[in-house]
Amino acid sequence: MSATALPAHDVSDLGLAAEGRRRIEWAEREMPVLRLIGERFGRERPLAGLRIGACLHVTTETANLMRTLRAGGAEVVLAASNPLSTKDDVAAALVAEYGIGVFARHGEDRDTYYAHLGAVADTHPLLTMDDGCDLVSLLHQERPAQVAEVLAGTEETTTGVIRLRAMAADGALGFPVIAVNEAQTKHLFDNRYGTGQSTLDGVLRATNILIAGRRIVVAGYGWVGKGITARFRGLGGHVAVVEVDPVRALEALMDGYEVLTAAQAAPWGEVFITATGNINVFRREHFTAMRDGAILANSGHFDAELDLVALRQLAEGHVREVRDNVLEFDLGPKKLHLLAEGRLVNLGAAEGHPAAVMDMSFANQALCAEYVAAHHDELEDRVYDVPEAIDREVARLKLAALGITLDEMTEEQKRYAGSWQSGT
């Protein structure tokens, strides 16, 4: 693609495009469901005339979602949802090889991050696609006149859905949003298996520590927490869970984990991983109680899960990088180590979820975009779950791509399942 034909963009180095394309194509091999959807989109063009503004992690998997939306006829522009998750070669390839506008640079500062979000908003998207609700929030808080232009949105994360439901409860949400995160084929697999494996990957890449025999504390026992605890226990870690929900705490206990308060866990643990979607899970009082060499990581959404203001105050400026993606905070009698600046460790210090898992999540994104393109006039300004038919179709396509077939109920079984007369 000639330089004059390139879409508006701000990326680090277009010279990385060829490498980015190779890695995007490698990920595509592990994304058969999205590929099948893309082939159908190419024939049917269900997104023709739709401008999509996306704020997502700029990874190889996201690149394949952008290509699928483009195949469906959409005009797509993408900004990063996390400064540390952007893969610069992928951003370059999307611009130079596929003609998709991207505003993302690895390690960009806060001002650049929001300038990039503004660049996406400048395109006046008709559909938003968010990973954390930042684009939706920007439109509502800074560009309220544009909100009426948006037909609908989709949201990928637990944190984003929490924010959107709060907006809806306040009567502040100006267009319907489908909570892709709530799809069973998303949270059962992406959150549990994807985040579980990629969090472990991020911690290992950053630290190269031995997990076996080490004390691991995981804050939060939702689907993400369940995945993380299972993977760290699988490598021989002694795992404890911190929870505020009694049902989840009981589940963790019966799954074989220690259940501790944050105060109890602080002097006990050696590695601390947050996965709650909330703020200041580990705070000043916990940092001061932690042992020398403790490792802090976050697999929630925002770096606010760790009270980094307090951590910096305790270190009084004595902070240095001791390895890539490892900051050492010298608190005097001990040192604490923060991974990936407290941002998502699986994306900041590794490559995020395996493509085979993101295949299902992004298949939901693509099919939900198709759904709202056809049905937005019927939807109210609130948060919707993914239609069950879409969830089941994603699961069906995934099984088919893996060569797996299922039994079907016999007519007798269908009658029995639908009757009330039969008993013991």
Image (spheres, rainbow, N blue to C red):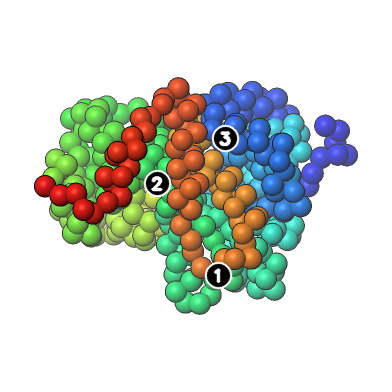
Task: Please report whichever mark, 2 or 1, sits nearer to the chain's N-terminal start.
Answer: 2
Disc 2 is placed on an element classified as helix
Task: Please report whichever mark, 2 or 3, sits nearer to the chain's N-terminal start.
Answer: 3
> Which residue is tagged 3?
34
Residue located at (55% from left, 69% from top): 380
Residue located at (48% from left, 53% from top): 386
Q: Mark 2 and mark 3: span between their CA atoms?
A: 17 Å
> Which residue is tagged 2?
184
Is 329 positioned to the left or the right of 83 in the image?
Answer: left
Q: Mark 1 and mark 3: span between their CA atoms?
A: 28 Å
Against 362, residue 212 (above or below) is: above
Is 199 positioned to the left or the right of 135 in the image?
Answer: left
Residue furthest to the left in view is 424
Quadrant where the image shows the N terminus:
top right
Query: What x and y, as percent, mark residue 330?
Result: 33, 47
* Quarter residue 165 falls in: bottom left
Query: What x and y, as percent, mark residue 100?
Result: 73, 41
Query: What x and y, as percent, mark residue 360?
Result: 48, 38
Instruction: Please name the amino acid that badge 3 sits on.
Output: Leu
Task: Please report whichever mark, 1 or 3, sits nearer to the chain's N-terminal start.
Answer: 3
Residue 388 visible, this angle: yes
Q: Residues within 10 Å of mark 2 (few under 14, many from 20)?
A: some
Instruction: Please name the amino acid that badge 2 sits on.
Output: Gln
Q: Mark 2 and mark 1: span between their CA atoms?
A: 23 Å
Residue furthest to the bottom in view is 171
Residue located at (18% from left, 30% from top): 213
